[in-house]
Amino acid sequence: MRSGLSRDDIQKKIHQLVDTLFRNIPSGVGSHRKDLKLSYQELDRVLEEGAQWAIKQGYGSAEDREHLEACGCIDGADQKMVSDRAKERGRAQLGTLGSGNHFVEIGYVEEVYDVKAAQKLGLEKDGVTVLVHTGSRGLGHQVCDDFIRVMLEASRRHGIELPDKQLCCAPLDSPEGKQYLAAMASAANFAFANRQLISHWTRESFEQVFKVGPKFLQLEVVYDVCHNIAKIEAHDVQGEKKKVCVHRKGATRAFPPGHPELPFDYREIGQPVLIPGDMGRYSYVLLGTEKAYQETFGSTCHGAGRLMSRHEAKRKAQGKSISKELESKGIIVRGASRETLDEEIPEAYKDVSDVVQVVHGAGISKKVVRLKPIGVLKG
């Protein structure tokens, strides 16, 4: 999200803002909202409508919808393919950040690489931004667990040899394949709705702290992009246009200028690509390219990537106060637990600048702006 605020506007209130976000957006393992009680019927609508359900309930506007991948709703979802256990886990978790590497990051545009593209995205030097990373929470995790068992059996029945059990699979047109695609789309729609709600409560938090209305804040969605998903798309394969299933695991879409699935106001520049780093360094906004469409099925990376396991990161963080270290660098951090902050120390990740330079240099995404964090809420 971009805003009408500048870095100077926010600097003196950053502690208050991070604390307000921490109160308004539940985070951590098993976090849930007490003020959003979904019936199972309502949850079924979330699974099939995605962010559009949230917008209909007043959590955002129709303008938001235009800047969400697939308009915030993946086709083919079928809530009947989601188990009761998955629904039970997800019902209380809509509108929550979760744990691990999930975050809400308040930052500002530190460097602009492409002025024209940045203007199209509403991003300018020193402008305040908010980056949200979360997904389908316990519901999506349970969908995965449920279908690993189904797919192991399907792999055996279809005679598919597996180098690792977690690579279990089934043909797309098999009953198991169709069921999983429908369940996965449902989980993705839950994730879209989840981020939409968090965006809404982020706006409310800014309004509470700055005592101004939405017209002044101008907190608008730049883009919402998926990762860890499979999508049916049309691509050129050896000179022939074919429908294919593109698996983006640890990857994100990077469609080129002119693609019909892009929002109208971004069509001439290409799809926004969001590549976050760690809580102590940078994040980037890039654009998709024609080269990505030709060479990587319109895909790029979705983050810096870990250098250390969580266990190793916790060992390295022993005896340190991560929050104090970051505050000395001008970054205010709140985490659901000390353990979360230890697992997510900046040294646990590759330097995202190096990663972004690779995808930029390879031509599969091009740099637009670099964002610098000043306030981070960690799950």
Image (spheres, helix red, strand yellow):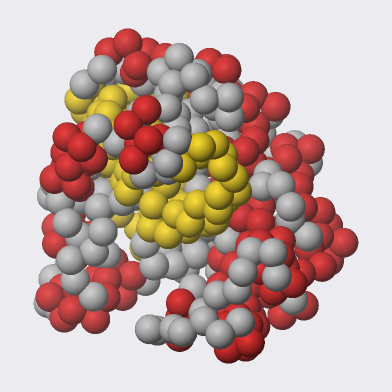
Going by the picture, which residue comes out furthest to the right? 41
Q: Nearer the viewer, residue 68 or 127?
A: 68
Classify 317 as above or below 209: below
Can the viewer see residue 173? yes
What residue appears at the point 32 percent right and 48 percent down from the top-left corner? Answer: 301
Q: Position of residue 256 (x, y in %)?
A: 42, 27
**Residue 349 x, y percent position in the rendering:** 20, 60
Q: Looking at the rendering, in which quadrant would you find the C terminus?
A: bottom left
Nearer the observer, 197 or 361: 361
The vertical placement of 287 against 135, above or below, is above
Question: Can you see residue 145?
Answer: no
Task: Tell me which corner region of the image, top left, top right, bottom left or bottom right, holds residue 118.
Answer: top left
At 76% across and 47% down in the image, what residue appears?
49
Please indicate whether residue 212 sits to the left or right of residue 89 in the image: left
In the depicted structure, whether residue 208 falls above or below residue 267? below
Provide residue 145's location: percent of width, then percent of height: 58, 80
Residue occupying the point 55% across, 53% down = 245
* Left or right: 379 in relation to 212: left
Q: Position of residue 358 (x, y in %)?
A: 17, 42
16 or 101: nearer the eye? 101
Which is more toward the observer, 86 or 102? 86
